[in-house]
Amino acid sequence: SAVISQKPSRDICQRGTSLTIQCQVDSQVTMMFWYRQQPGQSLTLIATANQGSEATYESGFVIDKFPISRPNLTFSTLTVSNMSPEDSSIYLCSGLRAETSGRWAQFFGPGTRLTVL
Amino acid sequence: GENVEQHPSTLSVQEGDSAVIKCTYSDSASNYFPWYKQELGKRPQLIIDIRSNVGEKKDQRIAVTLNKTAKHFSLHITETQPEDSAVYFCAERAGGTSYGKLTFGQGTILTVHP
């Protein structure tokens, strides 16, 4: 399966500031997603990152708070804007790609652990 | 909307015993059901998956069964080992498309005691 890397791996930020998380895949993927995982919780989809167009956001998430870019098939960024302590979470990038078996497999990056003070 | 219920939330077994985790879903158009294992501080890793046209799939000590009529699927781990201890998440792919978004269950914390 493809390898996904994220930067930064963790950060501690002050409220009111913004943080941009980068996601790089080592080979082309059809779709890229951004998830949030709060401590001890499941994964919640924030949005689907669309190449060359605006991301598709899930209910409860908006572009002004979580702007997303995907300039090409292997790279995406998620910005957490005007942060508050409630934004403290792990943010995970995910890629979806067709494998040689014909199945569509979805895999995850290592996550970015964000703490907002 | 899509909804996946996962049970139990915690599961404790002795090494060598079997472990079973069950998930139910609501979208009858869902056609793909993966299971992920997440060790502490690590990323979720796909361990097994099943499509809606198959009732059971096995890979060494792990197996997944699917009952489309009842809309539930289960993860079976046999001969458990301490390294199986992790959080396990089920998921379903919504809407019947082959590459739609995944909706995850709440997770099961599995502890295997030596």
Image (spheres, rainbow, N blue to C red):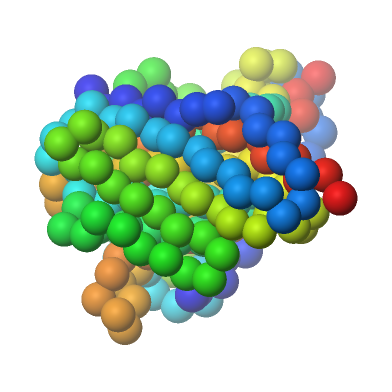
Q: Who's the residue at 47% across and 69% down the image? A: B59
- Look at the picture and state if A59 lies above or below A91: above
Q: Residue furthest right?
A: B114
Asked if one can make out residue B47 in the rendered structure from this viewpoint, the answer is: yes
Is A57 positioned to the left or the right of B110 in the image?
left
Is B26 positioned to the left or the right of A99 in the image?
left
Residue B71 image position (x, y, % from top left)? 23, 34
Residue B66 image position (x, y, % from top left)? 29, 47
The C terminus of chain A, quarter of image = top right
Q: Who's the residue at 24% across and 55% down the image? A: B55
Asked if one can make out residue A53 in the rendered structure from this viewpoint, the answer is: no
Q: Residue furthest front?
A: B17
Quarter of the rendering containing residue A116: top right
Residue B49 image position (x, y, % from top left)? 38, 58
Residue sitting nearer the eye, A105 or A114: A105
Quarter of the rendering containing residue A16: top right
Quarter of the rendering containing residue A102: bottom left
Residue A47 image position (x, y, % from top left)? 38, 38
Residue sitting nearer the eye, B104 or B67: B67
How many discs mark residues in the rendered view? Answer: 0
Is B15 positioned to the left or the right of A41 in the image?
right
Q: Who's the residue at 62% across and 64% down the image? A: A5
